[in-house]
Amino acid sequence: MRLRVALAEAIYRAGFIDFNRHYVQRLERWGIFRDEINPVARSNVCPEINPPATPSFYAFCYTVPGTGRSFVAAGSGEASDGPGSYAERIVRLGDQSPDGMCDKARYVLGAMERRMAALGLTAGLAAGLGTGLALPSAARAQTQMTPDAALQAMMDGNKRFTQGQMTSFNDDLKMLKEKTAESQAPFATVLSCADSRVPVELVFDQTIGHLFVCRVAGNIATAALIASLEYGVAVLGAKALMVLGHSNCGAVSATIAAKAVPGQISALYRSIRPAVDQAGPNAEAAGKANAKIQAGLLGTTSPVLAEQVKAGQLKIVAAYYDVASGTVTLL
């Protein structure tokens, strides 16, 4: 199919809208633009240097017979989906630093891989740009990630979370459910607090099948939790294990206050008390100390986890989540 080219002036918003108006009118004449749905994959070219005298660009679409999909576009721009203007949604708008360019490239390649994954393809496009992509592809396969790469993928995801540029919601959830129905291969496991303000998958911008999360008030390493974490590492193959404490933790504050509480809540105190003894009555300091103590316990009391660390197959870290800013800091 031959489509007209957006000329250089179309890089301005008004020109682009005008270009789209003519484009949609043509699709309507062809009878393939109905109910505000466009079934055609399109590419726009806005050349600034030596632009062609006449429209001459070709666009293609992939068809997937028998899947219910009309096509999957394999290209992407650098603006995420969501509210706001196009400019407001551009990843690292105006940032031409190496880090800014890498973040833009990660987003674009991530969108391309997600779309290509719908065709059963796993291109590994972002292999040279880090692993901060939320993809159901080889880039996430447990056998292809190092512990450092797994940890970096989590921290890159938290950066997207704090900047409002999350990509995990763009994943095809139906496809992910189908691919993870029979098995799972998370690249990291997290021991976090049960606090409702710490939505782990959102905090790290990850989707179905990426994180093996164990939650308990105070993020304490009890025998049952250690068993679950061992399963995530030894059986499922997670490469990073993070103990995630957080600000304004009720379990830490309650341990500091040491007052009578209902039911079995006080059973948490004995595990958190060493951190309070070490850091004093400051809740933030005690929360950070608790995360580090629990991470240390995992590396010393579990032979399974210790062996994985010794073999270079696992990295255990402590981190702290600020519920106000959304930022995760490694301790």
Image (spheres, helix red, strand yellow):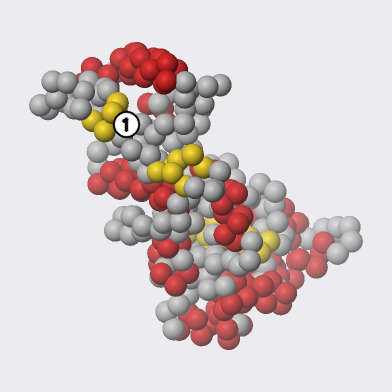
Q: Is 43 situated above or below 224?
A: above
> Is residue 242 in view from this perspective?
no
Q: Quadrant of residue 301?
A: bottom right
Q: Nearer the viewer, residue 232 or 277?
A: 232
Residue placed furthest toward the right: 263
Left/right placement of residue 103 relative to residue 96 reads: right
State the residue position of label 1. 1
Between 189 and 51, the one lying in front of the other is: 51
Residue 270 at x, y percent in the picture: 74, 71
Q: Relative to 316, is 163 above or below? A: above
SS for dot 1:
loop
Label 1 Cα crowd, 10 Å radius (few <14 / some 14-19 / many 20+) = few
Report the residue at 46% width, 66% height from top: 141
Q: Amino acid at mark 1?
A: Met
> Is 310 rendered above or below residue 281?
below
Name the spot of residue 226 as percent of width and height, x first.
Answer: 66, 75
Quarter holding residue 283: bottom right
Which image quadrant for residue 54? Answer: top left
Relative horizontal placement of residue 142, taking residue 8 as reference (left or right): right
Q: Quadrant of the N terminus?
A: top left
Q: Position of residue 282 (x, y in %)?
A: 62, 55
Q: Residue visible at 70% across and 48% down?
A: 196
Q: Is residue 28 visible?
A: yes
Count of labels in the image: 1
Is 195 situated above or below 45? below
Q: Is residue 122 left or right of residue 224?
A: left
Please name the residue shown 63% across and 50% down the image: 198
Residue drawn 63% across the image and 66% down it: 182
